[in-house]
Amino acid sequence: MAQKALAAAKREGATQAEVFAVASVTKGVYVDDDRIKIVEEKGDQGMAVRVLKGRKLAQASSVCKDVDDAEACARAAASLADRSPASRTYDRFPQPAKAVLTPAARDGSIASLDVGELVDLVKATVGAATDRGVKVPKGVLRAATTTSTVINSNGLEVTNHGTLVYAGYDAMAQGSAPGEGVGYFNSPWLKDYDPLKMGGDIARQALQAREAKALEGSMKVPMLIFPGELKDMLAYSVGFAFSAESVNKKRSPWGTMLDQRVASPKLELVDDPSDPRGALSAAYDDEGVPTTVKKVVEDGVLRTFLYDSYNSSVVARLPSGNGMRRGASDAQFVFQAPLGCGPVNLVLRPGTRSPDQIIASLDDAVVVEKFAFPTVNPYTGAFALETRLAHIVKKGSIEGQIKHALIVGNMYEGLKNVVEVASDARTVGEMIVPSVAFDGFEAVGSK
Amino acid sequence: MEDELRAAVRIMQDGGAEFCDARYQDSRTLLIVVSNRELRTMSNGRLAGVGLRARIGGSWGFAASASTDRKSIEEMARKAVRAAKAGDCPGRRIPEQPARTGSYRARGRIPPASVPIEEKLAMVKDLDEAQKISDKIVNTNAIYAEGLKATTLVNSFGSSLRWEDGRIRLIANTVAADGGRMEAYRESIAGTKGMELLQQRDLAEVGVSTAREAIVQLGAIKPPQGMVTCITDPEISGLLAHEVMGHASEADEVVKRRSFLTDKMGKVVANEQITMVDDGTLDGGYGSIAFDDEGTPSSRTVIIQNGVYRGYMQNLETGAEMEVPSTGNGRAQDFGRRLWVRMTNTFFEAGEWTLDEMIEDVKFGILTDKFVNGMEDPVGGGFEAKAHRGFLIENGKVTKPLRAITLTGKALDILRTTDAVGNKVGHDAGMCGKGTEDYVPVSSGGPYCRSQIIAGGD
């Protein structure tokens, strides 16, 4: 179908054409109040066709159940290109090139997975929580396979095979002031999903959140932030700052900082598409450009931006293999996703000590386990985030829990004031991130 | 397509489904983005396929595919039944409903699809160009999106319905920079009306004012921290309505006793000036729908009336559990994803105060402006609302612009402190996830409201 679409685009006058075709199968289980609520099996296939007529660019995407759909999609893209004003610089899609990295291994068991196996894993997760007196009002575990193929009129033709396992659970410790625990899991590997650990973690969180108190006053102490929360804070700040899309639009705060210090020397950020733990690790990006391992921030110094083919054309250089459509939590309808310019698998190099060892070395600190929604202002780095569960550390020991306090600070400044990077790196979305302790943030309570 | 869907329903019923439905959806979208005077995106999209639900006991089997031939749909129906049997959830039988039939077109006088793309592109280019009012403006963005979703639904009550939902949205987003500082501002126009919604507005003025406010923000100062007197603007009032009171009033949270509003019916939960509704019939509202994804007509649900808690939003299943009718709030992101109880247009109704009267009484406080995002907390009754910016109020006067502000606290504590409710309601469009997934278009809004809230920002 992809070849037919490419041919149709050429017939419609495309000087260049590209097809991103993807098929996925997703099996999932939802839990509702400790019971199996929904069991689902879903399949989809579709494509995104990009057409260039000279420098006039347009895209159409569609589900494709047959060749007619594929050709209609190509014609729609060609028709839109006729009406588009010309780009200043973009006139070609990527050229074919051999893979630099060996494709990361995928979980072969997922293709033949019986949905009953997911049901058993969900029941084990729920059991681990209910054994601790905590219920699970909602949750989901799903596993998916995706096959994405990119072909273009320059002769490029590549295929990525991916697997994706995602889980998200909410637990609730009942009482007059109930507590909530939240857990997420991302991986290409189903074997890495540990239902007993997930169930135990969300139960502990819920029980601790129930006992957590509102913070009175404010505290300016080191703050250790867990991977699940730190990932979003990084995505909204540095993920924005090192994307060439932001740089070319002149809205990146790091736009003029190449080869300058942007973070503590303790910090190293690498885009590593070869890492088998990465949810999206692959030998090619979603434009068919070979991916490479790139140190983005090395010893705190900004070493490169990340480029898709469009943004590389703006500055007359080659793309870096960072044109991405796939997402880390859902394999469904990927062809609909716009082409973005970002990391394939961003790894924050872990330190040597565990979070517990770091906590033991701190006199006064706050350990943030759960924010409401950890977003950061990408232009300024400013944030003020509500804690749903945080731990107060006194003389190296956790003394109690707080919630409904605001943690206030600036992420770009925080990256320059890293106390220590922990060793507990794990896959969270499209990143692999450990906990990190920062200086300079403030906890603000109600009085 | 109805014949294929009916066949699927028969197979699911024969397989033991106590209730089942079959949905075919065909959604078409157009997106145009212009940034810094260059076209960045010109794309259209089509998403079409079938979703089947079979309910046995209190569990559902769900199957979805883009394949629409009879054989594939029948196989999906058998899959859905098998999947439902793998569940173990107890539940009350959904009582028989009247069969609904008919065909309904999208609201809106000028269908967006009837307007040439060249005209839309010119509008987006003009909106982008208008933002370049100063050398301090480093990045201009104009975004136009339109969508039309046609749904055909057949269910085991004998319903056979077809309806359309159409939406348009136009956004201006400007980034300004000066002396190492960078700030942004945005404006948007959105609704379920046709192109007349945009043709009524002076879009050049929208672009200029967005840019002007981005420049104003370059001089903004750090907001105060801690408990303050806060006048929330319509967007942030709406965020409070939506994120806390709204999500916690979705009956699927209530039947699980996951909502802090469980058992609050008839109790005082807010100052008597507060009335809050969810209204899927609101004319032109971004969250307005003709029918929900179960084929129930949308409706207006009073959630809080003069401070007293009055009602939950329902779908067929939660209505059965609570022995009340569905309110038409069963919604799914698309045919391929599960259905939950979801909001439509959720807002506080108007009171009697003017904004000037509210400000006059404040010795020290803040006035918010525009939301960035928020997060629900149905379990704890807390909320987080991020405001794009604000203004300092000193001795009854607005004095200085403030950088981004986050508001938090316990919703019921805040609503009890609300001592002034404004006389005009504003609405703003957004996409709402249940947690972090399953996004549906909604609007939220309200008047200016004055309360005591914990604030912070850097």
Image: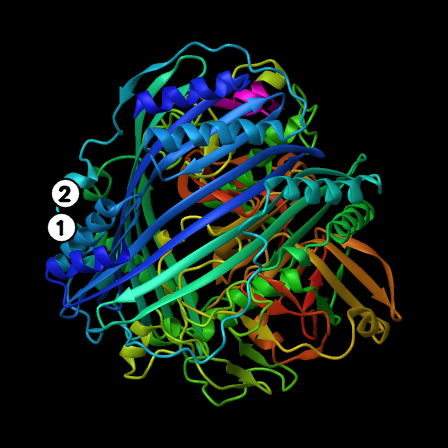
In the rendered view, would you say B335 is above or below A254? above
Question: Which of the labelled discs sits on residue B119, or is there none?
Answer: 1
Task: Tell me which corner region of the image, top left, top right, bottom left or bottom right, holds residue A100.
Answer: bottom left
Residue found 64% across the figure and 30% down from its top: B87
- Verify whether residue B301 appears in magenta: yes
Evaluate whether label 2 is on the same chain as label 1.
Answer: yes
Q: Give the range drawn in magenta.
A: B300-319
The image position of residue B70, as x and y in percent, is 34, 28
- Verify whether residue A279 appears in magenta: no
- Asked whether the viewer can see residue B4, the reply is yes
The chain under label 2 reads B
Front residue of B19 and A134: B19
Q: In which quadrant will I find the C terminus of chain A?
A: bottom right
**Hey, what amino acid is under mark 1?**
Glu
Q: Image check: B306 left or right of A207?
A: left
**Hey, what amino acid is under mark 2?**
Val
Question: Which of the labelled discs sits on residue A303, or is there none?
Answer: none
Check if mark 2's residue and mark 1's residue have beta carbons within 8 Å: yes
Q: Which residue lies furthest to the bottom in this view?
A: A259
The image position of residue A313, as x and y in percent, is 27, 78
Write down the residue under mark 2.
B115
- Asked whether the viewer can see residue B123, the reply is no
The image position of residue A444, as x and y in percent, is 70, 59
